[in-house]
Amino acid sequence: MATASVSTPLKSHHGIFSTRTAGGRMPLTPSPRIRTSSLATNISNTSSPFTPPRQTTESTRIVSQSTYGNVTSLFSRSTSRTTYRDSPKSNIAKAKKSPKHLELGVSDWTLTGTGTTVGQTPSKSAARKKGPLRTRSGKTTIRLEAGDRFIPNRHASEGIVTAGSGKFDESQRPKTSSGEGSAVLANAVSAFDLGGLVAEDDATGALEGLSLEDGEEVPSYTKPAPDTLAYESSLATACGVSLNTRILAFKPAPPESSKPIDLRSQYNRPLKPANAASAQFRRRVLTAPERVLDAPGLVDDYYLNLLDWSSGNQVAIGLERNVYVWSAESGTVSCLLETAADTYVSSVKWSGDGAYVGVGLGSGEVQIWDVEEGTKLRSMHGHDTRVGVLGWNKHILSTGARSGLVYNHDVRVAQHKVAELVSHASEVCGLEWRADGAQLATGGNDNLVSIWDARSLAAPKFQKTNHRAAVKALSWCPWQPNLLATGGGSYDRHIHFWNTTTGARTNSIDTGSQVTSLRWSNHYKEIVSSSGFPDNSLSIWSYPTLVRNVEIPAHETRVLHSCLSPDGQMLATAAADESLKFWKIFEKKPGSASAMSREGGITGKGGDMVKQMTIR
Amino acid sequence: MSAEKDKSKVHKLSLKGSSKLIAEFFEYSINTILFQRGVYPAEDFTAVKKYGLNMLVTSDDQVKAYIKKIMSQLNKWMTGGKISKLVVVITSKETGEHVERWQFDVQIFNRPSKKTSSKDTSKPPDKENAAPTDTPDPPPEKTEKEIQLEIQSIFRQITASVTFLPQLDAGNCTFNVLVYADADSEVPMEWGDSDAKEIENGEKVQLRSFSTSNHRVDTLVSYRLAD
């Protein structure tokens, strides 16, 4: 036990300089560093003056071994042994370290290490200053003397512990005859049980070797101290470190903080957590559908846009080859059109005034219908792939097609195509004009969001590549015109919020499922997202806190389309389970009527309406 | 007085119970430090009544699981009396510097497992040099209530310490848990040898202590002085 504990300090001693490299055993005695430094501080001495000489000590020792053989053949005999003996001795030396030693560390070392220099400058203070610098230069000259110096130092070592280092010089100088010294040494070595490994015949060589390679450390520390252990443990206990203690760290990295923290707000934290406080004021959202309609034949295709609610309170829905219009006022359903047998309805969109509905077809044709009259006003050709998305800006109808092209049509003129917006490489499935018509946002199957300035449509103002799946869900914030929300498909699952003036992404939400549509509330600082697998739900998020206020399991299959009623209170959702559901999720509070931002206060007064009805 | 003494005897904690109490104290300490020092956002913590205080405990699943893993091992070591220190180090993510170090020194009285010969032989000469605090005598037994009050005052102090501790680069710090364990402790895979992660030229502040019939815990925080 004793030897084990003694031998370790050497390793850990190296560990001082590179704590990481020392491998598994190093920390078994983590103490040396702590010991020395903390001790040093105890004695009101900094650790820094102590450590540098330590380092040089190591270097000189190594050098001495190599140059040694060159200097004298006599010495070369013991070189092998020197390395051999190196560890046990220096261990003891190490263990011997006492608080007093530490303090003396520098001068102590200088005396022995820099032979000639010391002799010239016996004064302690001078030696101390020069110490670390001189060592390297004086290396070679030391060699021969070193053997002799062993003795004085041994004697002095007593003094070191008790008295100051000043004694060194005196005791060291006079005894320079090597013969005498070595004889004494030999006795001393065996007496101290250091020479257990030394054969008698080359005792002198061994001694020389000893003194040489251990250089400075040995002389000062050789006293084989019966109380070595006592020192060790006293050091350990003084520093509060037990020798057979190891420092263990819990290795796995701690989890990342979920978001940046401002401690200032924490210091001023109300006694009740903010969440709990807001919970009681959090508005209650009706989680049951107001009305459910069948929507048979609704094509289960994420890339189509088959549902829209007009400002005249009529809902248009494309079911395979037909477009039906359901009047929320009267609850009546009419079939507006039926396409040719070889194609299908791929998109519907009401014009801003609610009088016309634009219909995109799988053939690439775009039709405009007068709903009141039930007649087709015109057909616009141009796309040769299906038109999956439409968007009105007054008299301009924008159409996005599978080819990735977006055309702007002026519906008033014969040469209807007024602009070609090229940015998407794959099917355009999201398209939304800002309410003031100044900007247009498009999203495509190429995971790209393009934001266009209506005045320059040659190239998009911004192109955003943050989404990792098709972008169908696009919505402009009603109360902050330059805020756009975009939602990505099943591989992406994120909602990103953009400042469309600067192009900066201001916020993001990971929804955990495919985002199929996004709608801002007109009355609340909230946005609702509809999602696909796995929840098929509607989520209402507060903005800008991005807290999910409520999640409503809405449909049995993924929600494909959603649209808001003109009064902004009701959300209609169509899903692949062939149902159309109406949710009163943004119900206005009585008394807050002034908050109405959209035109009309048309509520679906359908009290006389049956709960379930088939549009067809 | 005598009546009180009787009571204290009734409520005397066994070594095992004391270890448990201390492990629990560590758990709350870690949570409190993480909260007070803004290692994780305040919203991630929920208040729990403990030690007559509202203690804040993380409700983040990942952090919870992380601490739980630490605690499960710590419990084992505590009951085995293998631990002499627990250290929570707060490290800057950017520079990797250790900015704050919370150290809890544990002393175990009447340690039964410490009968190794080397230790015993080294003890006698040691006594001359040892600091007076080194070999503490077990304090008079305390009631659970007294212990709880002591713990309470430590937590009050930890909470209060944010007033003198330098403002951390909140949210940009991470933490590590170190344990000073006996060399012969069983070490699971997740724990590895480490350096002490001391703070260079750090300022040290000794906080309060508490003790049970078997353990004494001292608290010390060291922190990097603002440049």
Image (cartoon, coloured by chain):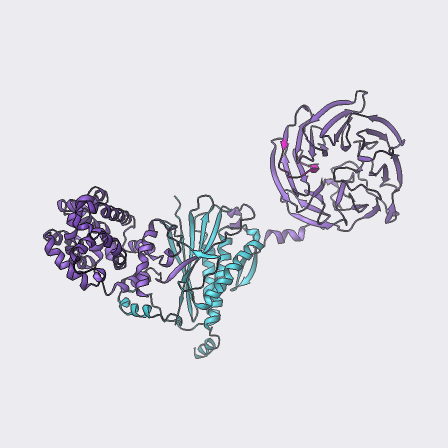
Chain colours: A purple, B cyan
Tell me the residue at 78%/40% (across/down): A565
Q: Which residues are magenta?
A: A463-481
Instruction: Tell me residue A270's x, y (percent).
Output: 56, 52
Quadrant of the rendered image containing residue A523: top right
Q: Quadrant of residue B211?
A: bottom left
Observer able to see residue A311: no
Magenta segment includes A471: yes
- Point 38% across, 70% down: residue: B114
Q: Is residue A456 above or below residue B128?
A: above
Determine if residue A480 is in view.
yes
Q: Nearer the viewer, residue A207 or A522?
A: A207
> Is residue B136 found inside the magenta-colored segment of the image?
no
* Coordinates of residue A123 in the picture (x, y in percent): 15, 47
| Image quarter of the N terminus of chain A | bottom left
Q: Position of residue B29 (x, y in %)?
A: 48, 59
Question: In the rendered image of this protein, does residue A329 appear above or below residue B8?
Answer: above
Going by the image, does A297 lie left or right of A236? right
Q: Is residue B135 left or right of residue A594?
A: left
Classify the position of the C terminus of chain A by image quarter.
top right
Dividing the picture into quadrants, the one containing residue B126 is bottom left
Indicate left or right for B200 with A481 as reference.
left
Give A430 or B160, whichever is nearer the viewer.
Answer: A430
Q: x, y percentage for residue A424?
A: 68, 30
Instruction: Count every numbered label the image shows and give the total.
Output: 0
